[in-house]
């Protein structure tokens, strides 16, 4: 690109990228390795290969209950956040109105508020309106945190749409509702699926809010936190690895759905 | 019924906030007419078309379609299909599904929908692509899909918003003949918005010229070319030199106009009445002006000017000059005629033309 | 077309608005009210009493925690930005289009792993008899104490923020007009000077926003300071969890939370103002 290339500096820069990646991925890879290691406190040299921790969580009914709660919450949150996010994205795409910056701020700000504070505020508020301590409260809280992600993904897709497309459909005789069904939704469909899966993955990870808000019905991340606070158990690695694999599966599915949305088998 | 115009713009005004996009548009479009609305970008031509389509609401005035007022009626309740500049084809539908779209919106049964769509695809010569995806088509083929999609309901009027601007020159010319042929065959009204004079003049029966929201002139291409109404139109056509002056004497045959340069003679216009002393503007086409070395004899009107530069394109060249008073002139000539004069920059030359080549601008 | 909102437009715009008002803005507003409530016999009572504000603000423990959190978050933002920049610069300017796309994909992966699990894994690496110290032992170094101190906390912050900061920096560097860089070289501006005087000023807004995100995330995080920093002395977020767990002193936790929000808003506002300040007057 530029004329003066210095191989030494370029080499050092690439080494720096590698070091950053090692720093970022070592804990992730470590967690996988530890989950298959017999030692309770792994160190060098590593202990022997073992699936003990996976067997333990497999046999723990609490983990299963937490897992199903997480799935249930994730599915509801994905549906709610995607619906809300779609509405917000379409509103931003289509309309200009007084107070729009406030609307957008309200829609997009939640992820910037620390989860501890969100958890505190929501638990305090939801307990006042008798919504705390159950799965619904977790779904509400996750809906707030996840809808901005869904909105951003769908808005991005809408911005790739020829702005005349909607007007063309109106012009060809479809009213606004019909056009929504036959043009806007088909066009944004890949993003809608992506939003469903990504908000589900985010919900999987939002343990802190769940911890504060949920009482008896624990979701998986809350369970993880319980392990950390109580007896430290390498079972967390096994759970974490499984959660990671499920999250990544959601993302890969979303990626496949997002790819080549224009090409259609004929 | 047949003698009522299909479209009547009755003193239509469109404002966006404090900006006036269209100012008192008042004109009619005849049944079966090919009307072009022409102007540079931002002149209000597209807004005018969108108001007719029902995509914008007029701020004042009425729009009548087939003698009925259509203000406030949403576009999906009108039969005014439009072809977009971007074509706005649905990328998630096949060619066939795109063409069927408006029939589907009108709840036409599936079998009939299919048949009618295929008829139009066939008519436009793209039936073989019916099951293809839009992204697999060439620019010209997409153009035809857009036309078929708009015509499938067999409307009385078709609106086109610069549909050819994305095509290369060759394809553009071919599509122009497809469009005019189609319009003649169908006998329906086309309203065609463009910034290109060649597109407008080669296809349209009548042309509307707009500038800054105002209609400057409406007429057949020939009328507009021969008799521009005002300075804007003369300038927009791009090849005229406009002179300002006062009428010194108006004879039956010849008018004498006093300008800051000198006095010019021109053939008395039959359709314009002016009293002596009133201001007059007239245009002289750059093709009708000639250049000569100072001192050589000439006929008619003349003025001295300095060469600024030249533009050489194909068989002809345009020489740009400036008079001592600062007026810019352009003269368009074949290369052979230019051989006799020295047209280097800085050279002083004589520009001359005949009185019958002066056209008085009636709108000034 | 018309100014009166239609049923159609309200169907799509209102649900999100109502949801975020009811479950985001109201809870935060409720926090303000809560901070004036009083606690008697382990029961919260609606009240209008400034006692919580006075109690919290008069404690040196609070101010110690406040400035420690501020310092840690600022250090995190600066150190992570500085660490990220060479990598972001190299990704944006030195890698081909394909490698760049792969890098972005790879850097997104950490967002879908549990932060908590990563922190637990880091504990294993950083502890006194952990993997890192065992490795250093082979080299004849250490052992070093890397857990339950600021080093541990900052390492955790970096795990959380580094991928995001690199991504945001890469996106802003991608927008730097490549002609500017060539023009600078053409005017004999050296490599390093071009980076400092052309590239960084051009990408300033994005770089500042990236640092701001690191600050926001670190300031509010309670996992790293608790499990890697040892939790003692506490940061503000640990303080909130401590106060809520010990008895019913939620109004005091609300005071801490509101102070955090005010600080975050002030810093965010100042950073954004700085980021978008134009050259010249």
Image: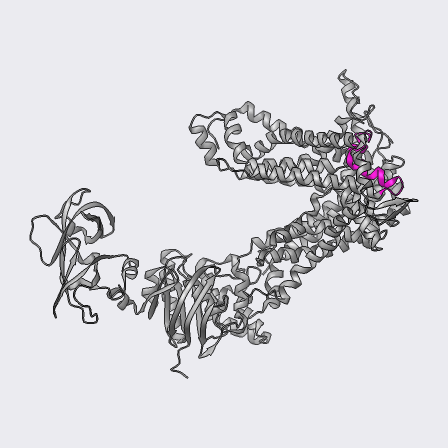
Comparing C225 with C108, the one in front is: C225
Q: In the image, is residue C234 part of the stretch drawn in magenta?
A: yes
Residue situated furthest bottom in the rendering: B1
Q: Quadrant of residue C62?
A: top right
Q: In this view, which residue lies farthest toward the right?
A: C41
Asked whether the viewer can see residue A170, the reply is yes
Q: Is residue C130 above or below residue A211?
A: above
Q: Residue at x 29, y 67 (%)?
A: B221
Q: Is residue A31 visible?
A: no
Pick whichever, B52 or B89, lies toward us.
B52
Q: Position of residue A136 (x, y in %)?
A: 81, 55
> Where the N terminus of chain C falls, by quadrant?
bottom right
Rendering coords of residue B257 (x, y %): 15, 61
Q: Is B46 colored magenta in this rendering? A: no
Percent position (x, y) of residue A248?
Answer: 72, 45
Instruction: Give the vertical position of B200 relative to C74 (above or below).
Output: below
Q: Is residue C174 left or right of residue C257?
A: left
Q: Residue furthest top?
A: C140
In magenta, the rendered stretch is C225-249
Relative image position of residue A185 (x, y in whole percent): 63, 61
User: Is C170 positioned to the left or the right of C247 in the image?
Assistant: left
């Amino acid at each position: 690109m530029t004329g003066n290339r210095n191989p030494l500096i370029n080499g050092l820069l690439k080494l720096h990228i590698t070091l950053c990646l090692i720093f970022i991925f070592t804990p992730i890879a470590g967690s996988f390795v530890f989950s298959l290691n017999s030692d309770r406190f792994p160190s060098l040299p590593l202990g022997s290969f073992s699936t003990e921790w996976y067997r333990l969580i497999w046999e723990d009914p609490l983990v299963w209950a937490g897992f199903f709660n997480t799935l249930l919450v994730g599915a509801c949150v994905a549906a709610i956040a995607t619906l809300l996010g779609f509405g917000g994205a379409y509103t931003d795409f289509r309309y200009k109105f007084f107070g729009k910056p406030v609307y957008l701020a309200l829609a997009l700000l939640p992820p910037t508020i620390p989860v501890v504070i969100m958890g505190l505020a929501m638990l305090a508020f939801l307990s006042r309106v008798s919504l705390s301590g159950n799965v619904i409260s977790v779904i509400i809280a996750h809906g707030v945190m996840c809808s901005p992600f869904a909105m951003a993904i769908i808005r991005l897709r809408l911005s790739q749409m020829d702005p005349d497309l909607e007007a063309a459909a109106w012009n060809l005789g479809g009213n606004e509702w019909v056009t929504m069904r036959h043009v806007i939704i088909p066009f944004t469909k890949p993003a809608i699926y992506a939003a469903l899966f990504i908000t589900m993955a985010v919900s999987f990870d939002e343990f802190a809010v769940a911890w504060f808000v949920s009482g008896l019905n624990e979701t998986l991340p809350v369970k993880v936190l319980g392990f950390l606070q109580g007896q430290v158990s390498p079972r967390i690695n096994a759970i974490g690895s499984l959660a990671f694999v499920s999250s990544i599966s959601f993302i890969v599915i979303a990626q496949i759905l997002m790819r080549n949305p224009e090409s259609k088998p004929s | 019924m047949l003698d009522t115009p299909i479209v009547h713009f009755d003193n239509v005004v469109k404002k966006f906030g404090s900006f006036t996009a269209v100012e008192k548009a008042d004109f009619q479009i005849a049944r079966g007419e090919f009307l072009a609305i022409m102007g540079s970008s931002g002149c209000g031509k597209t807004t005018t078309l969108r108001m007719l389509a029902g995509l914008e609401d007029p701020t004042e005035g009425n729009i009548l379609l087939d003698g009925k007022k259509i203000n406030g009626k949403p576009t999906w309740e009108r039969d005014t299909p439009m072809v977009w500049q971007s074509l706005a084809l649905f990328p998630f539908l096949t060619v066939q599904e795109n063409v069927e779209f408006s029939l589907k919106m009108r709840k036409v049964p599936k079998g009939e929908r299919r048949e009618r769509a295929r008829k139009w695809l066939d008519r436009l010569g793209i039936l073989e692509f019916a099951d293809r995806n839009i992204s697999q088509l060439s620019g010209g083929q997409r153009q035809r899909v857009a036309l078929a999609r708009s015509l499938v309901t067999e409307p009385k009027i078709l609106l086109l918003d610069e549909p050819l601007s994305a095509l290369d020159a060759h394809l553009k010319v071919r599509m122009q003949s497809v469009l005019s042929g189609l319009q003649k065959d169908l006998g329906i009204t086309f309203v065609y918005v463009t910034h290109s004079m060649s597109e407008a003049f080669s296809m349209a029966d009548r042309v509307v010229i707009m500038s800054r929201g105002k209609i400057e002139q409406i007429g057949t291409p020939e009328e507009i070319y021969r008799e521009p109404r005002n300075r804007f139109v003369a300038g927009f056509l791009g090849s005229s030199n406009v002179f300002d002056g006062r009428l010194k004497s108006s004879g039956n045959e010849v008018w004498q106009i006093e300008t800051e340069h000198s006095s010019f003679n021109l053939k008395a216009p039959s359709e314009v009445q002016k009293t002596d002393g009133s201001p007059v503007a007239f245009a002289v086409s750059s093709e009708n002006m000639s250049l000569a070395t100072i001192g050589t004899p000439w006929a008619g009107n003349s003025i001295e000017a300095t060469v600024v530069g030249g533009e050489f394109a194909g068989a002809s060249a345009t020489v740009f000059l400036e008079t001592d008073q600062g007026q810019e002139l352009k003269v368009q000539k074949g290369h052979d005629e230019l051989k006799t004069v020295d047209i280097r920059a800085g050279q002083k030359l004589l520009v001359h033309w005949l009185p019958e080549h002066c056209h008085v601008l009636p709108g000034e | 077309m018309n100014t009166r909102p239609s049923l159609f437009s309200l169907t799509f715009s209102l649900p999100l608005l109502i949801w975020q008002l009811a479950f985001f803005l109201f809870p935060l507003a409720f926090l303000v009210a809560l901070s004036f409530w009083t606690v008697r016999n382990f029961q919260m009572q609606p009240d209008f009493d400034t006692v919580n504000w006075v109690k919290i603000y008069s404690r040196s423990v609070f101010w110690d925690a406040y400035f420690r959190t501020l310092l840690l978050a600022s250090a995190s933002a600066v150190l992570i930005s500085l660490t990220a920049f060479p990598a972001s610069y190299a990704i944006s300017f030195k890698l081909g289009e394909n490698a760049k796309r792969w890098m972005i994909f790879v850097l997104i992966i950490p967002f879908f792993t549990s932060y908590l699990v990563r922190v637990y894994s880091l504990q294993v690496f950083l502890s006194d008899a952990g993997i890192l110290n065992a490795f250093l032992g082979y080299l004849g170094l250490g052992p070093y104490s890397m857990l339950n101190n600021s080093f541990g906390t900052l390492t955790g912050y970096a795990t959380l923020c580094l991928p995001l900061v690199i991504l945001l920096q890469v996106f802003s560097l991608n927008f730097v007009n490549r002609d500017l860089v060539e023009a600078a070289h053409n005017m004999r501006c050296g490599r390093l000077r071009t980076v400092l005087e052309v590239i960084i000023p051009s990408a300033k807004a994005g770089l500042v926003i990236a640092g701001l995100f690191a600050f926001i995330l670190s300031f509010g995080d309670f996992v790293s300071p608790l499990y890697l920093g040892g939790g003692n002395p506490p940061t503000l977020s640990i303080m909130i969890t401590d106060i809520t767990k010990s008895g019913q002193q939620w109004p005091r936790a609300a005071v801490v939370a509101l102070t955090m929000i005010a600080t975050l808003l002030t810093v965010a506002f100042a950073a954004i103002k700085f980021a978008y300040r134009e050259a010249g007057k």
